[in-house]
Image: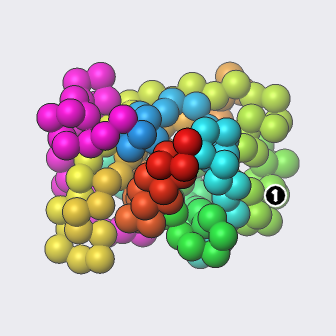
Amino acid sequence: MFFGSLDEQAWTPVRGWRADEAGVGREMAAVLTVTSSLTRFLERHHGMRLTVRLHDQFIDHARADESALLGCGARDTVLRRRVSLLHRDAIMFDAESVLPLADLPAELMAQLQEGVRPLGNLLLDRGLSLSRSDLSVARLQTGDVFDGRWARRSVLRSPSGTRALVVEVFHPELWRRIASRARRY
């Protein structure tokens, strides 16, 4: 993974997660638990239009934990995409997506390779409805630069069969900007 091994983290399904017990405020909890497109949510609710910085995109094999979440075969061929999402040149969060190639339409593959737009927006703009399942959150304990940061993991599914495991790790700047905007209103 982009962030090291995240399968060892204590992921908590949002159904059983209590933001107040985790010391998380209302605005932060809304970001961590939104089930629609996160980039569109941030734009609509916080006026944050995000841009994508593509770090890497390559063909790989699904790891066992990824296969289990995606419902695909162990070691199936996948497209692995690593991006950062920025607002006004500052990174708000990093994301890694894992998409089984067997279900990936050629047109979507071409759009992903351009590396310009967020995955959720690409799927929605293609007229596909999205459902997000297995949404879980974690406060990372990695012993590196990501230590203590909040992350979320989920599986996106479209009616056409496209699936994507998405892990997002949030930078402190996102929470600062959200708090700053909330104080203005």
Secondary structure of the residue carrying numbered label 1:
helix
Q: Position of residue 46 (x, y in %)?
A: 60, 46
Label 1 is placed on what type of residue? Ala
Q: Quadrant of the N terminus?
A: bottom left
| 178 or 2: nearer the viewer | 178
Q: Would you say residue 22 sits in the magenta stretch?
A: yes
Q: What residue is drawn where x is 81% and y is 57%? A: 110
Q: Position of residue 120 (x, y in %)?
A: 65, 43
Q: What residue is drawn where x is 31% and y is 29%? A: 14
Residue sitting farthest toward the front:
184
Boundaries of the magenta span: 1-26
Q: Is residue 59 visible?
A: no
Binning the other alpha carbons within 10 Å of mark 1 as few (below 14), some (14 to 19) or many (20 upward) gives: few
| 182 or 93: nearer the viewer | 182
Q: Quadrant of the C terminus?
A: top right
Disc 1: which residue:
110
Q: Would you say residue 161 sits in the magenta stretch?
A: no
Position of 77 with respect to 50 (left or right) is left
Q: Is residue 160 visible?
A: yes
Position of 178 with respect to 65 (left or right) is right
**Relative to 37, residue 1 above or below:** below
Looking at the rendering, which quadrant does residue 90 occupy?
A: bottom right
Q: Position of residue 26 (x, y in %)?
A: 36, 35
Q: Position of residue 84 (x, y in %)?
A: 56, 67
